[in-house]
Image: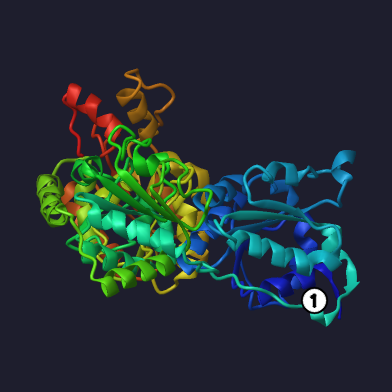
Amino acid sequence: MKTNGARLFLEMLKLHGVKDVFGLPGETTLALYREWERFPDVRHILTHDERAAAFMAEAYAKAAGRVGVSEAPSPGGAHPAPGVLESFKGSVPTVCFTSDVPFNNDTRNTLSGFDQNRLYEAITKDSILVTRAADIPHLVRRAFRTALAARPGAVHERIPYDVYEEEVDIPESELYGGTSLWPADRPVADFDRIDEAIRLLAEAKRPVIVCGQGALVSGAGPEVRAVAEALSIPVGTTMTGKGAVSEAHPLSIRVVGARGGTSYSNQFIKDADLVFFVGSNTDSAGTDGRKLPSAAAQPRIIQLDISRQEAGNNYRADAALVGDAKATLSVMAERIRERGVSGSAVNGKEAAEAMAALDSSIEAAAASDEFPVHPIRFVKALEARIPEKNMVMVEPSTGSIFSAAYLIQKNEGRMFLSGYSMGALGYSLPAAVGAAVARPDHTIVSLGGDGSFYFNCGELETYSRLGLDIKYVLFNNNVFGWIRGEIEHVYNANPFATDFRQVDYCKIAEGFGIRTFRIGRAEQVEQVLEEAFSYRGPAFIEMPVKSQDALVPPIPRWIPNAKKKSLPYHY
């Protein structure tokens, strides 16, 4: 078949089931863009920044359950890095295609040319260079396979514009694709190790299951519940695993760790004699810097992970299970049932009591008329009014920790997206676009702070142009609140380089043609949410809140300082 590199590339995307690509044009992508109209099945989503496009692709992958794809021209070839890095660290399969000047011209001072592969080698599973149009089918297939293989993650592929322009006669036998679905494979862990894990679980007096993103991706909720219910084991999740099981389940202890965990949930980890990590990389956020559990407590550890590299990485595993969460837990649950295994756990009945106490502890805050608005009042109002088909996006901000801790997700599944693998600001606003494109029948709620708003506020035009049903909530305290909190509560120092001048953010959103709401007193919260949810389409809500040094969210290492200085806090 006679074709050119650009058409061949787009054909390969189509053969991999790619429906949407996020990106923006540049001189080095024009050879590609002139061919795009021939491929209406591969929709191009125009963005305003390459970084935003990469964040959109990452969120799209999470929401759609398939590889997220972004593209960028060589003048912006370095810009996708924050989004690519979030995918890489978060084990989210994405492929970022960048165009470039002809290979080796970057050594001749060609405008916008540089060695992109050296940049991306450090933050991807692989950074691939395409030097011939004839290699496009093989190398696109390789990019998708690599993104999905074992522990998934980001892949970068660099295609110079002369490769897009090159005419080529390609054999029809080369025109085949592969899967883009995530997870692509469901290996089962070694059966002997599964049996050992069952024995350890049955013997434990105070076991806890902690589900990370891997459990969520795998759709392992029913299997987690089957094991937990059979042995009466409390189940928590990390922030990135929120929704792996229903937080209304009587065995749920909701989010644990340093990002969304509370004293009520984290106490279960402190008291545990066994912790079973399911699809969690046991990172610092999920374990509070490996203090939940602590090495001194010496609980037994079972770790189930798709990656052998992660199973036993941060904790010595008494049983390391390498496999897909759903497939492996299905075998485990079946063996428990067939063998009539009964547990020794005594803490299962405590879960519902602890969560009831947690809910009671925030009743006053949920009804508070204080202004600036108490975040817990907003979170509980949101919980009561958000449409059933919804997704919530968060990033490091006031909204993220309070919603992770106190927004009860009753339905099982991926409904809460966070950019906490790297914790970069500017995530939630563009991530909402990726989620909305992946799930057009869902209402997307994006929670951001004024500090991060500036990073990608241009994507409000994307909201407006595409008519996306995204409700963006700006938690406004006129500062980099997280940094201010860290300076106060950890370094015991005066804030430095954290404060902004007051800005009319609603006017900015109105300039993009978006309907806006400004909350001026606490009793408006419920009314504004009801009005924003009454129609499909973008909305911008500005809500004043206190900074994290004045009202302390449930961050374990901030609480001692809050107590010492008699600051209001929740934990």
Which of the 4 image quadrants contains residue 288?
A: top left
Report the side of 50 relative to 2 (left or right): left
Residue 253, compared with residue 532, is above or below; it is above
The residue lying at 34 percent from left, 62 percent from top is: 244
The front one of 482 and 28 is 482
Report the side of 147 relative to 238 (left or right): right
Q: Can you give x and y, in whole percent of width and height, for residue 91 in the image?
A: 52, 54
Q: Can you give x and y, in whole percent of width and height, for residue 214 in the image?
A: 43, 58
Residue type, label 1: Glu
Report the side of 156 relative to 240 (left or right): right
The residue lying at 54 percent from left, 52 percent from top is: 87
Which of the 4 image quadrants contains residue 196?
A: bottom left
Residue 407 makes an appearance in the image: no
Secondary structure beneath disc 1?
helix
Q: Quadrant of the N terminus?
A: bottom right
Residue 142, compared with residue 101, is above or below; it is below
The front one of 248 and 32 is 248
List the residue tagged with mark 1: 174
Q: Can you give x and y, in whole percent of width and height, for residue 340 in the image?
A: 23, 71
Residue 158 makes an appearance in the image: yes
The residue lying at 27 percent from left, 45 percent from top is: 261
The front one of 63 and 375 is 63
- Badge 1 local density, few (<14 within 10 Å), some, or many (20+)? some
Residue 299, compared with residue 54, is above or below; it is above
Q: Quadrant of the C terminus?
A: top left
Report the side of 147 relative to 323 (left or right): right
